[in-house]
Every structure is written in structure tokens, then in C-alpha cells.
Image (spheres, helix red, strand yellow):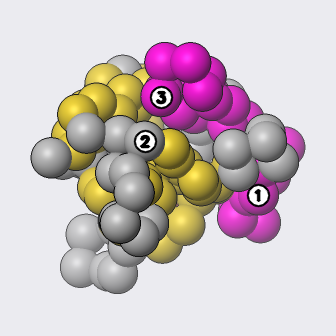
Amino acid sequence: QVQLVESGGGLVQTGGSLRLSCAASGSIFSINVMGWYRQFSGKERELVADITSSGSPNYADSVKGRFTITRDNAKNTVYLQMNSLKPEDTAVYYCNADVNRGLGWSFQKYWGQGTQVTVSS
């Protein structure tokens, strides 16, 4: 089994910052892309940012210049530094990882449980 545990969400004022962390553990041979998604109330989950195992990031247009995604491969952990937060960033944020569990396994997507980010105006 593979578990993704997120931390770092909370309540912040407009213009503030938060840092999300997501640690993957369990039966892991390798991890390809890791990323962050968010889900607004009543909407589908959308990509915020993701990063390859070699460190190449990709961002949604709405967060470019404000959010930074990084990862620590030795710790199987991905981070999302969120600056200049806006009320429209309020959502549940989910961590995602493409994990290979070893020989005979293909890459599978795993999800964290989600963490609430609320930005007050």
C-alpha cells in the first residue's frame, strides 16, 4: 500500500502565505510526477502544479508567479509554497503522486486525503 499524507493547510488573510507538504510512504519503488490539485466547492478537481522526478515544474496559469512547487526525492515529499494568496484560492488541496511499487507493477496514481486552504478577504 501507498499513503500520501498532507499537512500545512489552514486559514490565512489575503496576501498571506502558506506552505503545503505531502509525504508519500509505504510500498514505493519509484515516483514519477508529483503534484497538487485543488477542488472548489461544487467543482471538479483541477491541477495547480506538478513536478517531474528531475525537478521540472508545471503550473496552472492562475498560480504562476505566486506558487512554487518543489520536491525532495530522498524523502518522497512534495511541497507547495503559496504566496500572495487570494480569496479565490480557497479550496481543498490534494496531493497526487504517480507511484511504481516495483517489478511487475505499473505506475499508479495515488491521492492524499486533502487539506483545506481558506483565504479571508
Which one is closest to the eye, mark 1 or mark 3? 3
Q: CA distance from mark 1 to mark 3?
A: 18 Å
Q: Is residue 103 above or below residue 3?
A: below
Give SS at disc 3. loop
The residue that disc 1 covers is 58
Dots 1 and 2: beta carbons under 8 Å?
A: no
The residue that disc 3 covers is 76
Residue at image location 23% in from the left, 34% down from the top:
26
The residue that disc 2 covers is 29
Q: Is residue 98 above or below residue 15?
A: below
Q: Which mark is residue 101?
A: none
Residue 13 appears in the figure: no
Residue at image location 78% in from the left, 39% down from the top:
55
Q: Amino acid at mark 2?
A: Phe
Q: Horizontal and vertical percent for residue 81?
A: 62, 28
Give SS at disc 1. strand
Residue at image location 53% in from the left, 32% down from the top:
78
Left or right side of 93 for 75: right
Q: Amino acid at mark 3?
A: Asn
Mark 3 Cα within 10 Å, few/some/many (few <14, many 20+)?
some
Residue 48 appears in the figure: yes
First along the sequence among labels 1 and 3: 1
